[in-house]
Image (tube, grey):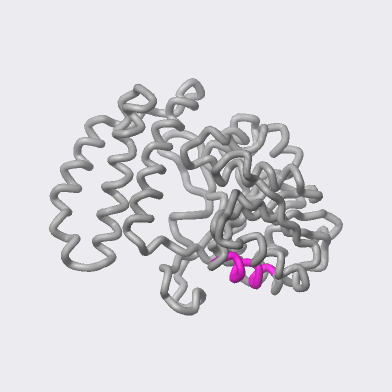
Amino acid sequence: MDESLAISVVIPAFNAAETIGAQLAALSRQEWSGSWEVVIADNGSTDGTASVAAAWKAQLPALRVVPATARRGAGHARNVAAMHAHGDFLLFVDADDMVEPGWLGRMADAARDHALIAGASREVGRGDGDPRAGLGRPNRWSGVAPSDGFLDAAASNNLGVRKQLWSAIGGFRESMVASEDTAFCWDAQLQGFSIHRVPDALVTYTMRSNLRQLWRQQFRWGVAAVQLYTLYRVHGAPRSSTRGGLLRWVGLVAMAPRMLISAADRRDWVGRAARRCGRLSGSLRFRVLFV
């Protein structure tokens, strides 16, 4: 393992006072003797996120909190933190997740030979108690996800990139409604870089249990799917199947009674419905049919 490589762990944060402490505690337990720092970009929080984060400087001496208030959005916050980062390699995680033991060392080891790397996540729901209880195999929400007929993408809650490559790409696209991590991965691959998988570098990913929050997240992802198509169709990104989209709407109607059966069924239905509605909204916004 090359411990001469300087690592910057980047955390975008907005009103994360209740969750960021668990992430920083998990980072403070990482056993890696190389040079590394934690850079938190506060995206205009009003709940004392910056103060909560700064309180961890005793356990994480190389921790810094930088303001990122010029524009709302995780993409902007990540870019600001990256600009302030001293490391040769950037590791992006989120303020409401938790890195698992050995994460830093495994990501740093992969960073020796690869410019773009992605770990994996294991999912828990909010309110489950100990976030490590009952964890299963890495799930579909993170790691490297193959795109339908186009390029791969990885979630920015466990993504690493050489700082020179981040700079050459121009950072995350701050104009994205959501899915700026997908756009970033596509931009990197279009420049000839591939995503290297690090399946044993894990984070605990906390799913949204509040249906309103889930709807907002999935709706934005639906809108972003249309935006991605408009940006990358010149590179071969395929248009969604109109027939397939209509069939999914029929499926939603047929599945609606299942919402009464269990909370899991309600979550699944709300997520699917929100993404479909987001695609309709995106089609209107970007003036292209993408359902």
Residue drawn at x 52%, y 61% is 121
Can residue 109 be seen from the camera position used here? no
Read off the magenta span: 19-27
Q: How many marks?
A: 0
Tell me the quarter of the image containing the C terminus. Answer: top left
Seen from the viewer's position, the closer of residues 210 and 110 is: 210
Q: Quadrant of residue 222?
A: top left
Q: Quadrant of residue 103?
A: bottom right
Where residue 181 appears, x then y in whole percent? 55, 43
Q: Would you place residue 66 above or below residue 234 in this image?
A: below
Q: Is residue 57 left or right of residue 15?
A: right
Q: Is residue 22 magenta?
A: yes
Where residue 162 appears, x then y in whole percent? 73, 44
Can residue 235 be seen from the camera position used here? yes
Seen from the viewer's position, the closer of residues 201 and 184 is: 184
Residue drawn at x 44%, y 55% is 140
